[in-house]
Image (tube, rainbow, N blue to C red):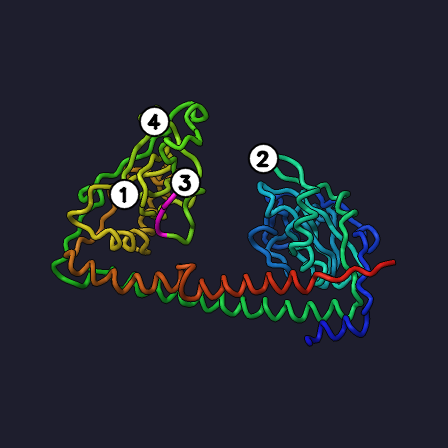
Amino acid sequence: MSRVEELIERLCPDGVEYKTLGEVGDVTRGGSFQKKDFVEEGFPCIHYGQIYTKYGLHADKTLSFIGLDTAAKSKLARKGDIIMAVTSENIDDVCKCVTWLGDGDVAVSGHTAIIHHRLNPKYLTYYFHSRAFEIQKRKLAHGTKVIEVTPNKLLDVRIPVPPMEVQEEIVRVLDSFAELEAELEAELEARRRQYAYYRDKLLDFSERGGVPLMTLGETMVVERGASPRPIKQFVTDAKNGVPWIKIGDANPAGKYITSTKEKITLAGAKKSKYLTSGSFILSNSMSFGRPYILQIDGCIHDGWLSLSGFEDLFVSDFLYHLLRSNAVQRVWLNKVNTSSVSNLNADIVKETPIPVPPLEEQAHIVAVLDKFDALVNDISAGLPAEIEARRVQYAYYRDKLLSFKEKVA
């Protein structure tokens, strides 16, 4: 029997009382400051957009600050309060939250709910990320393009309220899972830096004689995609449509694009840029310069660049590693930052100098780098797989620990 089970058996053998959030606390809306109000130093603040991407479940320091004048007009959270983002572009992210554990108050932006309560703050935050809460959240959420949960509606959310000693032990167990995951994430980040170092070293031919330098435009065809207008006329779910490749179809940690969420009609494909499997694509705007290899035939819009016709000079996987190298990425970043354009256009890519070693040497380099790449990026192997397994295990135990037999009044 676990320590949690022992405590439940001793302290609440007849079950755990469930209460509404309104019975154990109160909910207020956040303030109104925006990212443009950030300053280098000042009053600590949390913007709702940071809750999705910058913070974990708990925080005692902020990443941003606002001026004292702005803070004086802002809504504040106290130590132990929970700051919840109540709007999002998708149902999964809405109601993500962070426990404020800092010693002083913190200013909170709009699109949030500040939850002041009488429970263990970490316990309540873990509950707000559980499957039990998700089921309730989905019933409260409304909207299409923007999903929202009205703060006042949170008052009706039902929460299990075991004795404080049980709450504290559940927090201890779940914190241990979080600590282990953090250790694995740190090790993964160290491995990724190691991979980048060896990749760049293997792809540096400056001190190796006999390796010619050519521009990308001399070694392959570089073209911009095309968007049929009006786009809505051509988007379809028809089985005989042509795959329509969008940024959302690309896994940020992946190497290939194997499927798309949408398709366009044959009429739309004729007005777009059609590519065959094996071609490369690069985003020329969002996260520009990240290469992907197509494993499907499909069409790209004008937010992509295509690279094709390189087969005589490059092993496909070698070209992938080369385009990801710091040497190439720095060239593109510098060109975009110092030119009058704000995106990675075809001319910049065509002018990029790259080494063209023999195909046999390319294959040898690929064999080495693919092992590193799998270790740090493959979700089915190496550290990413172990981290994913830990996350699944954590979610299982979190939901199990936060499920109680309800006490009958």
How far apart, in angstroms, are the residues tagged by discs 1 and 3?
Answer: 16 Å
How far apart, in angstroms, are the residues tagged by discs 2 and 4?
Answer: 28 Å
How far apart, in angstroms, are the residues tagged by discs 2 and 3?
Answer: 20 Å
Residue occupied by mark 3: 260
How far apart, in angstroms, are the residues tagged by discs 3 and 4?
Answer: 16 Å
Asked which quadrant contains residue 208, the reply is bottom left
Could you tell me residue 335's position as x and y percent? Answer: 33, 44
Marks 2 and 3, the one that precedes in the sequence: 2
Vertically, is 188 above or below 83?
below
Marks 1 and 2, the one that precedes in the sequence: 2
Marks 3 and 4, the one that precedes in the sequence: 3
Marks 2 and 4, the one that precedes in the sequence: 2
Instruction: Tell me: 362 left or right of 402.
Output: left
Residue occupied by mark 1: 279
What numbered label is drawn on residue 231?
none
Query: Which amino acid, mark 1?
Result: Ser
Assign the magenta stretch its main secondary structure: loop
Image label count: 4
Residue occupied by mark 2: 145
Query: Which amino acid, mark 3?
Result: Thr
Residue at x-position 49% and y-position 64%:
387
Q: Residue furthest right?
A: 409
What numbered label is drawn on residue 266?
4
Marks 1 and 4, the one that precedes in the sequence: 4
Any part of residue 32 in sight: no
Q: Is residue 164 magenta?
A: no
Residue at x-position 31% and y-position 56%:
325
Mark toward the viewer: 2 or 4: 4
